[in-house]
Amino acid sequence: MTKPAIGLIGLGLMGKPMGLNLLNADYSLTVFNRTKSRADSLVAAGAKLASSPREVAACSDVLITIVSDPPALESVLWGTGSSKSDNSSGQNDQAEHDSGEHNSGENFGAFAGLKKGSIYIDCSTVSPALARKIASAAAAKGVQFLDAPVTGGTWGAEKGELVFMVGGSAATLNAVEPILSAMGKKWFLLGDNGAGQTVKLAMNSLLAVEVEAFAEALTLVMRAGIAGEKLVEVMQSSMARAAVLDVKAPLLLKDDYTASFPLRLMHKDLTLALDLANELNVDLPTTTAAHRTYGKVKEASRDDVDYAAVMKFWHPDKAHKRAD
């Protein structure tokens, strides 16, 4: 059987390696990113570069988006004006931001190009409410929709070992499982549209708290004159063991905060989690405290650092060591 044509919007730290894995699995791929140069490696590998989200959607049987936040996603889907690629760049343009300029009344959003009978998968981390809004708009066009945010970091995206948290129908998920298998190692159907986003926000809240708690404990041990490596050795051999520390503990010990998952995005996800908690009338004191700590580090950071840089709350003098 002929493989479906895939469109991918958002070529950031996660999107680009996801695209390369789709090409390696012999899928036809059309891509869009506001900063055109970020598509170069994918185009060199065989992808087609589109000039707008609408163009990507129009030529795709399955559309995938992975952008930075709710405003960026809404702009990609519904934005009017020129969302065409350009060569602009800047500290805040992390390739996950694909919003357009409003120069005309023409709609370059993906929803203007989506075909009846196609499937749309959003892998961004946004609010459950936005996921449900998208599901309703997709259904009105005869498009099947899955909210499927991912976890696994850039290393997981590069290895094709992402985990997808999916909200939507079992039939739609079954139809795209071969595509997900090109990018990830596991996926969970968690409920109706919005369920994937709900679990992702809960997951990221937990990860943020775990890394912050480790940074606190590490600071306490080091201030007492004990090497931080000693704490890690004991923790990882005890009930305190956490898989996230296999990845993040070495970064904190080396003060290397090169972004795998940027702190600004973790702070955004904590904000979304607290917004959801407010809607559900749930008190999240630990997440609230973490949101405050990450926020202070975000405000003080000059670089686009990894969320492991929460350590800077206790060690603001530590320089960010960029990877070679």
Image (cartoon, rainbow, N blue to C red):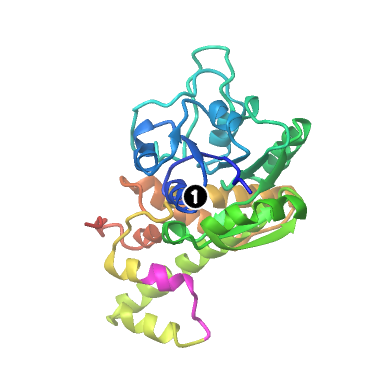
| Magenta segment | 239-249
Name the side, left or right, on which 114 lies relative to 95.
right
Classify the position of the C terminus by image quarter.
bottom left
Q: Can residue 288 be seen in this view?
A: no
Q: Position of residue 176 (x, y in %)?
A: 65, 51
In depth, the one of 87 and 30 nearer the eye is 30
Return the x and y of residue 149 as percentages of the image width and height: 59, 52
Circle 1: is it few (<14), some (14-19), or many (20+) Cα within 10 Å? few
Question: 107 or 89, which is in the foreground?
Answer: 107
247 within the magenta span: yes
Q: In this view, does 308 lie above or below 279?
A: below
Q: Looking at the image, is 101 positioned above or below residue 17?
A: above
State the image quarter where residue 250 is shown: bottom left
- Residue under pointer 1: 26
- The secondary structure type at the circle numbered 1 is loop
In the rendered view, does 86 fall on the left or right side of 1? left
Q: Which amino acid does label 1 sit on?
A: Asp
Q: Which is nearer the eye, 278 or 72?
A: 72
In the picture, measured across the screen, residue 221 lies left or right of residue 283, that is left
